[in-house]
Image (spheres, rainbow, N blue to C red):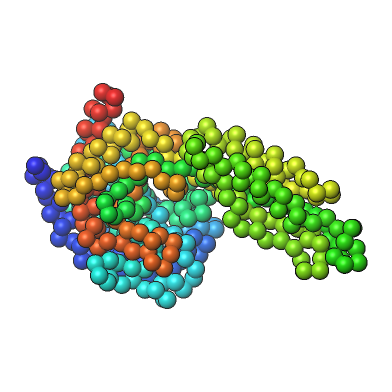
Amino acid sequence: MLTEAERKIVDWLAAREGDMLALLETLVNVDSGTWDKAGVDAAGEPLKAFFEKAGMTVTTDPDARFGEAIRAELAQPMANDRRPIILMGHRDTVFPKGEPTRRPFRIEAGRAWGPGVADMKSGLVMNAFVAAAFAACGGHPAPIVALVTSDEEIASPFSRAVIEREARAARCVFNSEPSRAGPHRITKGRKGGVFMAMEVTGKAAHSGANHDKGVSAIEEIARKIPRIHALTDYARGITLNVGTIHGGQTVNTVAPSCRAEIDLRYVKAEDRAPAIEAIRAIVETCSVPGASARLTISGEFLPLEESAGGRAMFETYRAAARDMGFEVTAEFTGGCADSGYTAAVGCPTLCSVGPAGGGGHTPEEFMEVASLVPCAQALALSVMRLPGVAAELAAA
């Protein structure tokens, strides 16, 4: 049974599906590939305007390379616990320049389509309207902060510091990455990921006249790859993948250089350092005479490990979802997200509470239109019921 205050919020959101879809169309049709700073900043403008119209205080963290981070706060001066509740999401996508022109937002067969529609512009729309619902109706037990970041798709090299700063001061974080449909699933845990590059230097030589004078960087990397892949340990959730290789000069030249990118995934934070050490040993120990190599880390995500706080948040969310007419379960995934950063600093975190969707990072990406309002309602109810989380933690 919903309280009067809960019913007011739920009804407010129920009346705004059309407005939510209109804002989603605006966001999806703005180019915002991570490296397109101007585009990512442009995608933030409709959100800033929305927050300001709702009466929230908007501030930004600028960066020279990446889009700015946006922080919109709805105050709650009557709260006993003044730590904010964070509704988090990113507006950058993986798609190349011009993708919204080629594949603009559309709704067809009950699904919304377009670049970033699920991952994760619909989650940002949901967060924005949940915050606006509290601004209009009240009922939030603590300040609400909508945090909109700009570089998640490349492991948040700029936004990570902003995210960690906000999480250290927060009561909890709801990360609105897309949930998964059929049946409805959110995320209880995620792997950590480290993205690395190994670069090998050899020596060029004519492959016909002076083959013996050359040092093949390609051969050296080829020898390393099976050893790196052999570090995979499925039982412990550790995987290694060499995903790209670039090297050589011409077909008739012994390759003077070669570069390969390595993806490491792991479950437990304690497994990161030993895995990196093992990879580094393989990379820096060369078996082709005259070759040299180095390993660099280009980006990384931290794992989202289950905690008592996260489990209590999930139980609160599951009950709220049930009140809104849908059942939800939680699953572990090998995919990474910014939620790992918030959990790692000790902030209770629940991930993938956004509208249901699928096909992320592909032209088949979609969002289930019918999930947009119920997911917003379940999130709002979860925020309102958070005092119960503290009691559950005390009893844990």
On the rendered structure, is 24 left or right of 42? left
Q: For the C terminus, which image quadrant?
A: top left
Q: List x then y, in percent, for residue 219.
A: 75, 55
- Is 225 rendered above or below residue 247? above
Going 11% across and 48% down the picture, which residue do you hit?
7
Residue shown at the point (46%, 53%) measured from the top left: 152
The image position of residue 194, as x and y in percent, is 55, 45
Observer-nearest residue: 36 or 53?
A: 36
Instruction: Report the side of 255 relative to 17 (left or right).
Output: right
Q: Quadrant of the N terminus?
A: top left
Observer-nearest of 126 and 178: 178
Measuring from the top left, give residue 378's x and y in whole percent: 21, 48
Q: Is residue 52 visible?
A: no
At a point 28% along the width and 27% down the height, the residue shown is: 393
Viewer-side residue, 395 vs 210: 210
Q: Position of residue 394 (x, y in %)?
A: 27, 24
Q: Say above or below: 267 vs 359.
A: above
Say if residue 154 shows up in the picture.
yes
